[in-house]
Image (tube, rainbow, N blue to C red):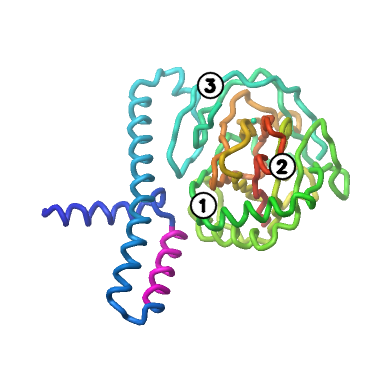
Amino acid sequence: MTPKQILDSFSQTLLQDERILSPQERALLTAILQHANAATFGNPETQHSIRSVIASSVGEIVAQRAFAVLGRSIVEGILQSTATPAREATRTGGEYLGPKDPQPPTAPAPSPGFEPLLPSPPSPGPQPPHIVARRAVSSTAVGVAERPRNLPAHCVVLDEFLAPQEVADLTRFTLEHEADFQASEVVAPHSEGGVVNYEHRSSRVLMDTGKYQDILLSRIKATLPEILSKLGLQEFTIAGVEAQITASNDGDFFHFHSDNTSERVASRYLTFVYFFHREPRGFEGGELRIHDARLENGEYVSEGTYQTIVPQQNQIVFFPCELLHEITPVTCRSKEFADSRFTLNGWLRR
C-alpha cells in the first residue's frame, strides 16, 4: 500500500470510532460542509479555503482524541496484564463505551445508612467497585415478587455526548437561571409529592430545562438500542420523560436511594445523568456510586461493593432506575454557584 492508502485506511477507521467522532458530530460536520458549499456558490477557491480551515480544526480534535484513546488503551493493557487475581475478582459487569482509566480504591467517607423517604483530580470512566463497611438499604412499595433477588451494579457511559456549542449554551442557560433553582426534594413512598430532607439529599434543582431536555432526548433516542443492549434491558416505548438540572455545591450530597422506589415513580425505567460544568472546573467530589445489591426482607441492601463514576465534562451515564446509588459530597472552595457540579439528569418512563 502507498502512504496515502495507509493514511486513508487509518482515517476511515477513526471515522467509524464513535470515541473519536460521534454520530452527532459527523452529522453536524456534514451540515456545516453542505452549508459552506451552498454559501460559496460553487467558487472553488473559496470552497478550498473553507475546507482547509475546517479540516485543520477537525484534524486537531481527532488527533487529540485518538492519542488519548490509544494512550488509555495501552495503560489499560499494561494494568490488565499485571492485575492480581484478588483485584480481578472484585470487578463487576459494568459496561463502558468510552475510554477506561482504572483508579485504585480509596477509603470511602463514612456515611450512615438511610431508610429513604420514598466531591484529587478526576479520572474518567466507571471505576472498579470498592468495598464499603456500611449497610445501605432502599425500601419500596413495588411488589417483592416483581423484583430480582440480586441487582449487580451496571452502567453505560458515553463521552462527548453533545456538540461543544451545545455544552456552552447549556452552561450559559444554567448560570443565567441561578435564581430559579430550588431546594431538591426526595420522593416519599406514601406522599403525593416530594419533600425536602437535608439529612438525605442536599442540592438545588431547576425543573424548567428549556430546550435542552429535547436536545438531550434526541441524542438519547439515537443511541438507546445500543444502550439497552449493553445493559441487558429490553427495548421499550418511552411513555414519558422527566428531566431537571441539578446544581451541587460545597457539602451537597445524595445518600443511598433508588429512582423508582414508590408507586408514584414505579414506571421509571432508565436513569440518565449528563455531567457538565464551567471551565476551569471549580469543584471536586460529587462521584456517582452505583452499588451491587441484594433483596433482603423486602429491601435492597448494598453488597458492600460499588462502581464509581467521576463526573467528566460532556459525559452521560445510563443505568436501570432500580439500582441502588448515591452521590458523594461535593467540595467547592469558592462556594460560587457557577463553580457547582451540574447535571442534566432524569428518567425515561415506560
Q: Looking at the picture, how far across and down is residue 19, in whole percent?
A: 41, 48
Q: Is residue 142 left or right of residue 289?
A: right
Q: Are marks 2 and 3 in contact (CB under 8 Å)?
A: no
Point out the tag, 3 or 1, that comes first from the N-terminus.
3
Mark pair 3, 1: CA separation: 27 Å
Q: Is residue 35 left or right of residue 333?
A: left
What's under tag 3, amino acid-wise?
A: Pro
Decide if residue 258 is in sight here.
Answer: no
Q: Residue furthest bottom?
A: 41
Point out the tag, 2 or 3, that comes first from the N-terminus.
3
Q: Which mark is residue 337?
A: 2
Question: Closer to the observer: label 2 or label 3?
Answer: 2
Question: Closer to the observer: label 3 or label 1?
Answer: 1
Q: Which residue is mark 1?
A: 161
Image point 66% across, 48% down: which residue? 345
Question: Closer to the observer: label 1 or label 2?
Answer: 2
**Toward the viewer: 235 or 198?**
198
User: Magenta part of the protein: which range?
Assistant: 23-37
Q: Looking at the picture, how far across and down is residue 239, in whole percent?
A: 68, 61
The answer to whether 249 is drawn above or below residue 208 in the figure is above
Label 3 neighbour load within 10 Å: few <14, some 14-19, many 20+: few
The answer to whether 83 is drawn above or below residue 203 in the figure is above
What's under tag 2, amino acid-wise?
A: Phe
Label 1 neighbour load within 10 Å: few <14, some 14-19, many 20+: many
**Toward the viewer: 200 or 36?**
36
* Secondary structure found at label 1: loop
Q: Which mark is residue 105?
A: 3
Point out the tag, 1 or 2, that comes first from the N-terminus.
1
